[in-house]
């Protein structure tokens, strides 16, 4: 009889372990079991907000990154009702996509587009909807699924953004861009509402460190990692002509170095045993900043003690990785840094390869040549416009100072964020482009505001310059 009793107990315990290994209802059953027995606490949930801030096939990599992140979360047991996806959704069936309905994030990768929720697409991918979704403000969103982060005080939030950026701003495909100050105000409101336990933010963008530098307090239980510091570019990878290169039918970069590094790590590692700091260190090393000219510094901001927690708390964990071994063959790829291309040059690379690969004398060759020349002309137009704006407002002798002044470490980019927001969004409206080349000059507008520029004078100069310097038709 005692043997049967012991067998019964063993089977019961085994069943409990198997059931509690998974994220039922997006909650941590195994880790929260003891807490619920002793403290009667509500089981925590994971909430995720994934944002691709661009559109156009030329920016393929950003939406590919976001789709890959969704697959990581989904495989980790996070439910769709807790994952909010912002993506323009215009590349999977774009005429340039030779694989309709398919998006890949690395040369031999699977289709990461499959099953991705279409929460906010097209014009609904905008600053107002994003900030309302983070705050859990259902009445504040317009269009889309209406899904928002309805988190509670025990929940964990993961936010991942991928796109073009500039000093103090993150790009959005519709309307105005997101400034660091507006994001920070939203995070402070979220914290004041006591609607999360802790939050992790990953940002893939040029000069992404400027979003948090001197702005993110350590007492808000938010830990942020950025692809670059406040002054440098982030990098595209799996690009045409580079190694490893995308399939020959895709003349565009498939991903970005920071993003593919943390996601490819998450693809194979047991995230119940890997801390956020371990993932940060792996990503930091893979960017090979010490070995590659021009590579970026992956940065940490906010409450760094959160980095001691397991990645599982914010992304779930794929049961297939339970028996991951550090000696496995897959792990070698995580120590190899692929070739990289500056975010600012990825558009030019795309158009150049379209031109080079088009048959000689064909209409495609003519069209590709026009696209390449138009992009070069647009960049010249933007360069000349910025030079003219500064010259009109401050004088030609001040151009180098406005372009090159950098705030010292630990200080925010700008003092007057309203001035900055007005100027960068005015410049986007007047001189903006799909390639978002103009974002490289956001620091100049910050320096103009720091120098006490008169806003009306500056916006008038922007309008005149952008309409004078013969942009391409």
Image (cartoon, rainbow, N blue to C red):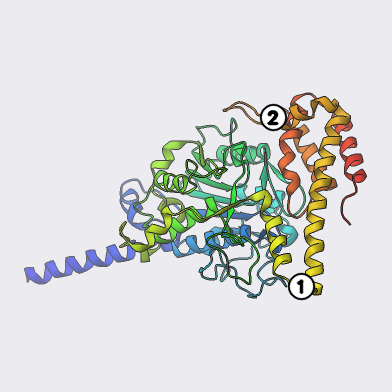
Q: Residues within 10 Å of mark 1 (few under 14, many from 20)?
A: few
Say if residue 43 shows up in the picture.
no
In the image, is 29 to the left or to the right of 216? left
Q: Secondary structure at mark 2?
A: loop
Q: Nearer the viewer, mark 2 or mark 1?
A: 1
Earlier residue among tags 2 and 1: 1
Which residue is at 53% across, 66% downward? 107
Q: Is residue 196 above or below residue 412?
A: below
Q: Is residue 275 above or below residue 365?
A: above
Q: Quadrant of residue 49?
A: bottom right
Which quarter of the rendering shows the N terminus?
bottom left
Q: Is residue 451 above or below residue 297?
A: above
**Could you tell me residue 303's position as x and y percent?**
47, 36
Q: Secondary structure at mark 1?
A: loop
Q: Is residue 1 above or below residue 391?
A: below
Say if residue 458 shows up in the picture.
yes
Q: Residues within 10 Å of mark 2 (few under 14, many from 20)?
A: many
Q: Nearer the viewer, residue 41 or 135?
A: 135
The residue furthest front is 360
Q: Which residue is mark 2?
A: 414
Q: Nearer the viewer, residue 107 or 313?
A: 107
Q: Nearer the viewer, residue 247 or 406?
A: 247
Q: Which residue is mark 1?
A: 360
**Could you tell me residue 386's position as x and y percent?**
81, 38
In the image, is 201 to the left or to the right of 436? left
In the image, is 251 to the left or to the right of 319? right
Q: Quadrant of residue 415?
A: top right
Asked if the residues shown at circle 2 and circle 1 are in contact, with their CB atoms under 8 angstroms apart, the answer is no
Q: Quadrant of residue 124?
A: bottom right
**Could you tell me residue 367's position as x and y percent?**
81, 67
């Amino acid at each position: 009889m005692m043997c049967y009793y012991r067998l019964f107990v063993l089977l019961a315990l085994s069943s409990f372990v198997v059931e509690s290994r998974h994220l039922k209802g997006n909650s941590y059953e195994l880790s929260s079991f003891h807490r619920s027995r002793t403290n009667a606490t509500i089981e925590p949930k994971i909430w995720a907000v994934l944002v691709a801030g661009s559109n156009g096939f030329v920016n393929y990599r950003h939406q590919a990154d976001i789709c890959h992140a969704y697959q990581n979360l989904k495989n980790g047991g996070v439910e769709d009702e807790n994952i909010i996806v912002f993506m323009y959704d215009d590349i999977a069936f774009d005429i340039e996509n030779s694989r309709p309905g398919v998006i890949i994030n690395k040369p031999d990768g699977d289709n990461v587009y499959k099953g991705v929720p279409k929460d906010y697409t097209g014009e609904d991918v905008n600053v107002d909807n994003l900030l309302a979704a983070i705050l859990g403000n259902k009445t504040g969103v317009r269009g889309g699924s209406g899904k928002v982060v309805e988190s509670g005080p025990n929940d964990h939030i993961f936010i991942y953004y991928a796109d073009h950026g500039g000093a103090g701003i993150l790009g959005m495909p519709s309307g105005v861009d997101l400034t660091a100050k507006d994001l920070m105000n939203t995070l402070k409101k979220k914290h004041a509402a006591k609607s999360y336990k802790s939050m992790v933010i990953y940002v893939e963008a040029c000069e992404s460190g400027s979003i948090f530098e001197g702005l993110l307090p350590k007492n808000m239980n938010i830990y942020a990692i950025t692809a670059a510091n406040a002054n440098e570019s982030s990098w595209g990878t799996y690009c045409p002509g580079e190694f490893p290169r995308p399939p020959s039918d895709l003349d565009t970069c498939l991903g970005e170095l920071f993003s593919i590094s943390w996601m490819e790590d998450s693809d194979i590692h047991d995230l119940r045993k890997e801390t956020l700091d371990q993932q940060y260190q792996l990503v930091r090393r893979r960017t090979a900043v010490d070995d590659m000219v021009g590579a970026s510094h992956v940065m940490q901001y906010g409450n760094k003690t959160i980095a001691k927690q397991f990645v599982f708390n914010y992304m779930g964990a794929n049961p297939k990785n339970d028996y991951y071994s550090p000696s496995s063959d897959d792990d070698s790829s995580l120590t190899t840094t692929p070739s990289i291309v500056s975010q600012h040059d990825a558009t030019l690379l795309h158009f150049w390869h379209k031109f080079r690969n088009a048959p000689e004398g064909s209409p495609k060759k003519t069209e590709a040549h026009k696209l390449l020349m138009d992009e070069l002309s647009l960049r010249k137009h933007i360069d000349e416009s910025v030079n003219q704006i500064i010259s009109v407002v401050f004088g030609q002798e001040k151009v180098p100072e406005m372009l090159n002044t950098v705030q010292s470490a630990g200080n925010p980019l700008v003092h007057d964020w309203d001035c900055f927001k007005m100027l960068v969004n005015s410049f986007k409206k007047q001189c903006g482009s799909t390639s978002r080349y103009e974002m490289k000059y956001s620091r100049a507008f910050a320096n103009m505001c720091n120098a006490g520029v008169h806003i009306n004078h500056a916006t008038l100069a922007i309008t005149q310059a952008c309409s004078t310097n013969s942009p391409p038709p």
